[in-house]
């Protein structure tokens, strides 16, 4: 993974370079992930234009978008909003892991729609984000990495990089809560227990086998 040279965006990195179990690497600057984009600077937009960014997948709810609108300016990108439900947050006894499982069980079609977007013929390079780039983005990217064959340790390492990227920020509550490996390994285990694999999970929610193949070809270096 590589940190991105974005001044106005936190938790921004490229998953390019991660290896699959078969030894293929993810192509650089094809799938990016970050926190919210409301702080993009002119220089940030110039850099995103220079890599040919085509798609931004925003996993936030409408009230988050209203509070922190993406500052993409005149960038010629497709904007896709696929927000998983946050209803589980209304339960004061719900843990962060409960929230992850509520997304996987109740918002499978949302994640599938995001993956179908990334598999599109003109979708990449793409950037996926939510508010902190931590939980919703973490779950979606983990599903994508698992589907293309990245080994679980590398998926976990990428997921946990958020802790180093964000740290505690007394001025912004969404950046204060750290994550741990059990959240993402437990989420992937939950998907496998119910569906057999992340690929089967996505197919059950509307992704086609052809789209899975296109996603792999779009993200992976040639064999």
Image (spheres, rainbow, N blue to C red):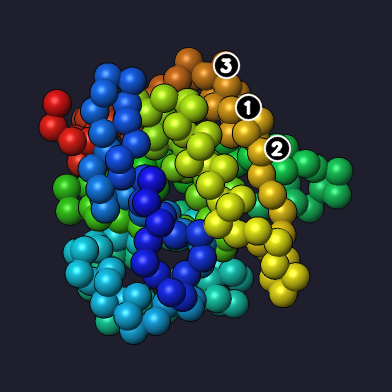
Q: Position of residue 111 (x, y in %)?
A: 46, 43
Q: Residue 101, percent across and down?
A: 65, 35
Which quarter of the rendering shows the C terminus?
A: top left
61 sits to left or right of 167: left
Residue bearing the label numbered 2: 97
Near mark 1 (Cα within 10 A), the count class, few <14, some 14-19 or many ≥20, is some
Q: Is residue 112 above or below residue 62?
A: above
Q: Is residue 46 above or below residue 33?
A: below
The answer to which image quadrant residue 146 occupies is top left
Horizontal relation, residue 113 to residue 104: left or right: left
CA–CA distance in space, label 3 to label 2: 16 Å
CB under 8 Å between discs 1 and 2: yes
**In which quarter of the view is residue 203 placed?**
top left
Residue found at x 32% / y 49% = 31
Q: Is residue 163 visible?
A: yes
> Could you tell me which residue is drawn at 69 percent across and 49 percent down?
178
| Picture disc at residue 186 | 1
Which numbered disc flags the more N-terminal residue, 1 or 2? 2
Determine the image quadrant of residue 116: top left
* Mark with earlier residue (3, 2): 2
Give x and y (percent) for residue 155.
47, 34
Please tell me which residue is depicted at 78% across the width and 41% down the height of the picture: 95
- Residue at the spot 37% in from the left edge and 67% down from the top edge: 5
Q: Which mark is residue 193?
A: 3
């Amino acid at each position: 993974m590589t940190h991105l040279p974005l001044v106005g965006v936190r938790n921004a990195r490229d998953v390019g370079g991660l290896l699959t179990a078969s030894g293929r690497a993810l192509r650089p600057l094809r799938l990016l992930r970050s926190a919210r984009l409301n702080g993009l600077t002119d220089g940030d937009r110039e850099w995103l234009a220079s890599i040919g960014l085509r798609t931004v997948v925003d996993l936030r709810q409408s009230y988050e978008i209203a509070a922190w609108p993406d500052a993409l300016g005149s960038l010629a990108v497709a904007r896709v909003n696929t927000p998983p439900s946050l209803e589980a947050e209304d339960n004061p006894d719900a843990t962060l892991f409960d929230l992850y499982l509520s997304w996987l069980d109740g918002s499978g079609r949302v994640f599938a729609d995001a993956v179908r977007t990334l598999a599109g013929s003109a979708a990449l390079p793409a950037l996926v984000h939510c508010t902190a780039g931590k939980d919703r983005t973490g779950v979606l990217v983990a599903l994508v990495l698992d589907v293309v064959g990245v080994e679980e340790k590398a998926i976990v390492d990428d997921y946990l990089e958020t802790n180093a990227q964000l740290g505690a920020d007394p001025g912004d509550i969404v950046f204060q809560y750290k994550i741990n490996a059990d959240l993402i390994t437990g989420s992937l285990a939950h998907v496998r227990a119910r569906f057999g694999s992340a690929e089967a999970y996505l197919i059950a929610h509307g992704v086609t086998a052809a789209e899975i193949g296109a996603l792999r070809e779009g993200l992976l270096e040639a064999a």
